């Protein structure tokens, strides 16, 4: 496994919001963390990225313990992060938003190659190169934020809500982008609140409910589990 969370517990403002969360992602895998709003997905991802202090448990990336490391160290270790709400810089053009990580993190690959690889995720972005971040739709902003995380040249992308709030017309484009990221040999940990938006090519899913992992398996296995389906879809 390249990423492993082992019994991670987190308390926010006196409330325990993660209860011994364990999950893992192997190289090249797409793993989805599914749960309703408030279930603890964002807190899990923020814990991995070093934004959240753990009460207990540990987080390992290629056997290295991440606990206590600052957020800025994560990029150097090969972890890319796209938070919920696509934090695109409104004052920068699409081109500059995507080039930004190549100024801040040097890797073995040259900047031009990394930028080209990022545009391969969403080739459509080349039509908007000179548009400002404020002049983009929600779907375009999401594409820019994912492409920017890829320009960092991460081994793993940690992606919070790839599909939420986007128009149905754009969902296949985002899905195709995820396929391309996997094709490039990266792994992806995707947090998603809508079960029906989960890519059919997900390798495994974890279901989180009230801060606890209540199911782990394939998408097919989940659909054959009435209790799990009830939790993630809110229906019987
Ligand atoms: N900064 C915070 N301080 C206190 N409680 C918080 C904070 N952030 C989140 N919470 C609480 O922690 C729990 C988990 O929230 P989290 O954002 O991780 O859930 P989520 O599954 O990502 O939900 P959503 O899909 O709505 O973002 C919720 O009960 C939430 O109210």
Image (cartoon, rainbow, N blue to C red):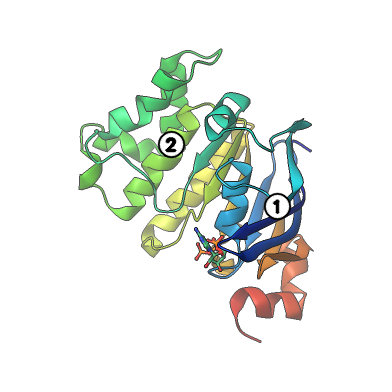
Q: At 49% across and 32% down in the image, what residue appears?
A: 150
Tell me the mark number nearer the camera, choosing from 1 and 2. 1
Q: Is residue 235 above or below residue 17?
A: below
Kindly tell me whether mark 1's CB lies below 8 Å from ligand 1.
no
Q: What mark, if any, has residue 55 been given in the picture?
A: 1
Q: Is residue 29 left or right of residue 63?
A: left
Q: Give how far across and how far down residue 231 sits, in percent.
A: 66, 77
Would residue 194 be seen by someone viewing this image from the given angle? yes
Label 2: few (<14), some or many (≥20) within 10 Å? many
Q: Is residue 117 left or right of residue 90?
A: right
| Label 1: which secondary element | loop
Q: From the viewer's perspective, is residue 30 above or below residue 28?
A: below
| 127 relative position to 139: left or right | left
Q: Quadrant of residue 36?
A: bottom right
Q: Residue 9: x percent and y percent?
A: 71, 56
Secondary structure of the residue carrying numbered label 2: helix
Q: Provide residue 211's location: percent of width, then percent of height.
A: 67, 65
The disc at residue 40 is none
Quarter-of-image position of residue 157: top right
Q: Nearer the viewer, residue 20 or 12?
A: 12
Which quadrant is the N terminus positioned in? top right
C-beta proximity under 8 Å, tags 1 and 2: no
**191 lies above or below 150:** below
In this view of the protein, which residue sits in the foreground, 236 or 211? 211
Quarter of the image where the C terminus is located = bottom right
Residue where numbered disc 2 is placed: 147
Residue for point 79% across, 31% down: 63
Can see residue 25? no
User: Could you tell me how far apart the alpha carbons at marks 1 and 2 are, in whole angstroms?
Assistant: 33 Å
* Residue at image coords 25%, 37%: 128
């Amino acid at each position: 496994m390249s990423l492993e969370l082992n019994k991670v517990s987190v308390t926010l403002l006196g409330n325990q919001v993660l209860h011994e969360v364990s999950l893992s992602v192997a190289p090249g895998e797409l793993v989805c963390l599914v749960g309703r709003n408030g279930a603890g997905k964002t807190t899990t991802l923020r814990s991995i990225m070093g934004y959240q202090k753990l009460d207990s448990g540990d987080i390992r990336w290629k056997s290295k313990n991440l606990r206590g490391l600052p957020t800025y160290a994560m990029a150097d270790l090969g972890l890319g992060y796209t938070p919920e709400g696509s934090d695109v810089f409104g004052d920068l053009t699409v081109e500059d938003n995507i080039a930004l990580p190549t100024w801040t993190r040097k890797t073995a690959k040259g900047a031009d190659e990394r930028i080209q690889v990022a545009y391969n995720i969403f080739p459509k972005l080349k039509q908007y190169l000179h548009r400002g971040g404020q002049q983009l739709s929600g779907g375009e902003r999401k594409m820019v934020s994912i492409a920017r995380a890829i320009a960092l040249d991460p081994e793993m992308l940690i992606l919070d809500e790839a599909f939420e709030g986007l128009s149905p017309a754009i969902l296949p484009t985002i899905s195709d982008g995820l396929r391309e990221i996997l094709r490039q040999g990266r792994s992806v940990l995707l947090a998603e609140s809508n079960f029906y938006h989960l890519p059919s090519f997900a390798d495994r899913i974890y279901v989180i409910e009230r801060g606890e992992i209540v199911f782990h398996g394939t998408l097919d296995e989940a659909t054959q589990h009435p209790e799990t389906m009830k939790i993630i879809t809110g229906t019987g």
